Image: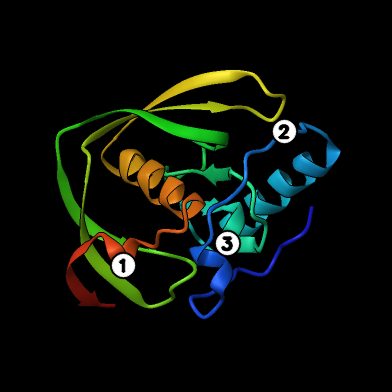
Amino acid sequence: MATRNIVTIDDDILYKRSRPVEKFDQRLWTLLDDMRETMYKANGVGLAAVQVGVLRRVVVMDCTEDHTGYLELINPEIIEKEGEQFENEGCLSLPGEVGVTCRPAVVKVKAQDRNGKWCVYKGTEMKARCFCHEIDHLDGILFTRRVIDNKES
Protein backbone atom coordinates (compact mmCIF):
# COMPACT_ATOMS: atom_id res chain seq x y z
CA MET A 1 0.00 0.00 0.00
CA ALA A 2 1.02 3.58 -0.56
CA THR A 3 -0.27 6.98 0.36
CA ARG A 4 -1.35 9.01 -2.65
CA ASN A 5 -1.45 12.77 -3.04
CA ILE A 6 -4.88 14.33 -2.57
CA VAL A 7 -5.89 16.66 -5.39
CA THR A 8 -7.01 20.12 -4.28
CA ILE A 9 -9.53 22.61 -5.64
CA ASP A 10 -7.17 24.18 -8.18
CA ASP A 11 -7.06 20.92 -10.19
CA ASP A 12 -9.66 20.69 -12.98
CA ILE A 13 -9.96 16.91 -12.57
CA LEU A 14 -12.26 17.49 -9.58
CA TYR A 15 -14.91 18.89 -11.93
CA LYS A 16 -14.95 15.92 -14.31
CA ARG A 17 -17.33 12.97 -14.31
CA SER A 18 -15.66 9.68 -13.39
CA ARG A 19 -15.94 6.63 -15.64
CA PRO A 20 -17.42 3.30 -14.51
CA VAL A 21 -15.11 0.51 -13.40
CA GLU A 22 -15.24 -2.47 -15.75
CA LYS A 23 -12.21 -4.50 -14.66
CA PHE A 24 -12.05 -5.91 -11.16
CA ASP A 25 -8.36 -6.75 -11.02
CA GLN A 26 -5.12 -6.14 -9.13
CA ARG A 27 -4.91 -2.58 -10.43
CA LEU A 28 -8.30 -1.77 -8.84
CA TRP A 29 -7.37 -3.55 -5.61
CA THR A 30 -4.13 -1.55 -5.36
CA LEU A 31 -6.09 1.67 -5.90
CA LEU A 32 -8.58 0.70 -3.16
CA ASP A 33 -5.80 -0.19 -0.72
CA ASP A 34 -3.92 3.05 -1.46
CA MET A 35 -7.10 5.10 -1.09
CA ARG A 36 -7.83 3.49 2.27
CA GLU A 37 -4.36 4.30 3.56
CA THR A 38 -4.56 7.85 2.18
CA MET A 39 -8.01 8.50 3.73
CA TYR A 40 -6.97 7.29 7.19
CA LYS A 41 -3.64 9.15 7.10
CA ALA A 42 -5.49 12.38 6.20
CA ASN A 43 -8.07 11.79 8.98
CA GLY A 44 -10.89 11.74 6.45
CA VAL A 45 -14.17 9.85 6.53
CA GLY A 46 -14.38 9.33 2.78
CA LEU A 47 -12.33 9.58 -0.38
CA ALA A 48 -13.29 9.32 -4.05
CA ALA A 49 -10.78 8.10 -6.63
CA VAL A 50 -10.94 11.43 -8.45
CA GLN A 51 -9.46 13.02 -5.30
CA VAL A 52 -6.27 11.02 -5.92
CA GLY A 53 -6.31 11.83 -9.63
CA VAL A 54 -8.09 8.72 -10.92
CA LEU A 55 -11.29 9.25 -12.94
CA ARG A 56 -13.02 6.01 -11.94
CA ARG A 57 -16.26 5.51 -9.98
CA VAL A 58 -14.55 4.29 -6.80
CA VAL A 59 -15.12 5.42 -3.20
CA VAL A 60 -13.72 4.37 0.15
CA MET A 61 -15.27 5.56 3.40
CA ASP A 62 -15.41 5.00 7.13
CA CYS A 63 -17.64 7.26 9.23
CA THR A 64 -16.83 5.55 12.54
CA GLU A 65 -14.42 6.93 15.12
CA ASP A 66 -12.91 3.49 15.78
CA HIS A 67 -12.38 2.67 12.07
CA THR A 68 -14.69 -0.35 12.14
CA GLY A 69 -17.07 0.82 9.41
CA TYR A 70 -14.78 0.73 6.38
CA LEU A 71 -16.59 0.41 3.02
CA GLU A 72 -15.48 0.16 -0.57
CA LEU A 73 -18.00 1.29 -3.19
CA ILE A 74 -17.41 0.66 -6.88
CA ASN A 75 -19.84 2.15 -9.41
CA PRO A 76 -22.11 3.42 -6.60
CA GLU A 77 -25.51 4.91 -7.23
CA ILE A 78 -28.07 6.31 -4.86
CA ILE A 79 -31.29 4.33 -5.20
CA GLU A 80 -33.35 5.88 -2.37
CA LYS A 81 -33.34 9.14 -0.41
CA GLU A 82 -35.48 10.19 2.52
CA GLY A 83 -35.78 13.27 4.70
CA GLU A 84 -33.33 16.14 5.19
CA GLN A 85 -30.44 16.99 7.45
CA PHE A 86 -28.47 20.20 7.78
CA GLU A 87 -24.89 19.73 9.02
CA ASN A 88 -21.38 21.07 8.62
CA GLU A 89 -19.43 19.48 5.83
CA GLY A 90 -15.80 19.71 4.74
CA CYS A 91 -13.57 18.00 2.20
CA LEU A 92 -10.01 16.71 2.02
CA SER A 93 -9.68 18.43 -1.38
CA LEU A 94 -10.73 21.80 0.08
CA PRO A 95 -8.65 22.12 3.25
CA GLY A 96 -10.04 24.63 5.73
CA GLU A 97 -13.38 25.10 3.98
CA VAL A 98 -16.52 24.17 5.90
CA GLY A 99 -20.17 24.87 5.25
CA VAL A 100 -23.63 23.73 6.21
CA THR A 101 -25.22 21.55 3.55
CA CYS A 102 -28.65 20.06 3.10
CA ARG A 103 -28.40 16.32 2.48
CA PRO A 104 -30.88 13.45 2.74
CA ALA A 105 -31.26 12.02 6.26
CA VAL A 106 -31.41 8.45 4.95
CA VAL A 107 -29.79 7.09 1.81
CA LYS A 108 -29.68 3.67 0.15
CA VAL A 109 -26.79 3.01 -2.21
CA LYS A 110 -26.26 0.19 -4.66
CA ALA A 111 -22.59 -0.52 -5.41
CA GLN A 112 -20.17 -3.26 -6.31
CA ASP A 113 -17.46 -4.59 -4.02
CA ARG A 114 -13.83 -5.13 -5.05
CA ASN A 115 -14.77 -8.42 -6.69
CA GLY A 116 -17.70 -7.01 -8.68
CA LYS A 117 -20.51 -8.34 -6.47
CA TRP A 118 -23.48 -5.95 -6.15
CA CYS A 119 -24.50 -4.90 -2.63
CA VAL A 120 -26.99 -2.44 -1.13
CA TYR A 121 -25.99 -0.20 1.79
CA LYS A 122 -28.16 2.01 3.96
CA GLY A 123 -26.83 5.09 5.68
CA THR A 124 -28.29 7.58 8.13
CA GLU A 125 -26.89 10.84 9.49
CA MET A 126 -23.11 11.03 8.89
CA LYS A 127 -23.02 7.91 6.71
CA ALA A 128 -25.81 9.27 4.50
CA ARG A 129 -23.93 12.57 4.13
CA CYS A 130 -20.73 10.73 3.30
CA PHE A 131 -22.47 8.60 0.64
CA CYS A 132 -23.85 11.76 -0.99
CA HIS A 133 -20.62 13.75 -0.71
CA GLU A 134 -18.44 11.03 -2.25
CA ILE A 135 -20.89 10.13 -5.03
CA ASP A 136 -21.10 13.86 -5.86
CA HIS A 137 -17.30 13.79 -6.33
CA LEU A 138 -17.73 11.05 -8.93
CA ASP A 139 -20.01 13.41 -10.87
CA GLY A 140 -17.62 16.36 -10.63
CA ILE A 141 -19.62 18.13 -7.92
CA LEU A 142 -17.91 19.65 -4.87
CA PHE A 143 -19.74 20.10 -1.57
CA THR A 144 -19.45 23.87 -1.97
CA ARG A 145 -22.25 23.66 -4.58
CA ARG A 146 -24.51 22.25 -1.84
CA VAL A 147 -23.57 24.79 0.87
CA ILE A 148 -26.37 26.85 2.32
CA ASP A 149 -24.28 28.53 5.07
CA ASN A 150 -20.48 29.04 4.93
CA LYS A 151 -18.39 28.75 8.08
CA GLU A 152 -14.68 29.26 8.65
CA SER A 153 -12.80 26.49 10.38
Q: How is the image coloured?
A: rainbow
Q: CA distance from mark 1 to mark 2?
A: 30 Å
Q: CA distance from mark 2 to mark 3?
A: 20 Å
Q: Is residue 152 or residue 94 the one in the foreground?
A: 94
The residue tagged with tag 2: helix, strand or loop?
A: loop
The answer to which of marks 2 and 3 sits earlier in the sequence is 2
Task: State which quadrant residue 123 falls in.
Answer: top left
For label 2, count other residues whose C-alpha is less than 10 Å away and answer few (under 14), some (14-19) or many (20+): few
Side of 65 relative to 16 (left or right): left
Q: Amino acid at mark 3?
A: Gln
Q: Amino acid at mark 2?
A: Glu
For label 3, count other residues whose C-alpha is less than 10 Å away and answer few (under 14), some (14-19) or many (20+): many
The answer to which of marks 3 and 1 sits earlier in the sequence is 3
Q: Position of residue 87 (x, y in %)?
A: 20, 55
Task: State which quadrant residue 113 falls in.
Answer: top right
Side of 14 relative to 21 (left or right): left
Q: CA distance from mark 3 to mark 1?
A: 15 Å
Total numbered labels placed on residues in the image: 3
Q: Position of residue 104 (x, y in %)?
A: 22, 39
For label 1, count other residues whose C-alpha is less than 10 Å away and answer few (under 14), some (14-19) or many (20+): some
**In the image, what residue occupies the spot 51% across and 50% down?**
138
Q: Is residue 59 or residue 44 the one in the foreground?
A: 59
Per the image, the residue denoted by label 3 is 51
**In the image, what residue occupies the spot 39% across and 62% down?**
142
Q: Amino acid at mark 1?
A: Thr
Residues tagged 3 and 1 counted as in contact (Cβ below 8 A): no
The answer to which of marks 1 and 2 sits earlier in the sequence is 2
Which of the two marks, 2 or 3, is nearer to us in this view?
Answer: 2
Per the image, the residue denoted by label 2 is 22
Q: Position of residue 45 (x, y in %)?
A: 46, 52
Q: Position of residue 66 (x, y in %)?
A: 47, 43
Per the image, the residue denoted by label 1 is 144
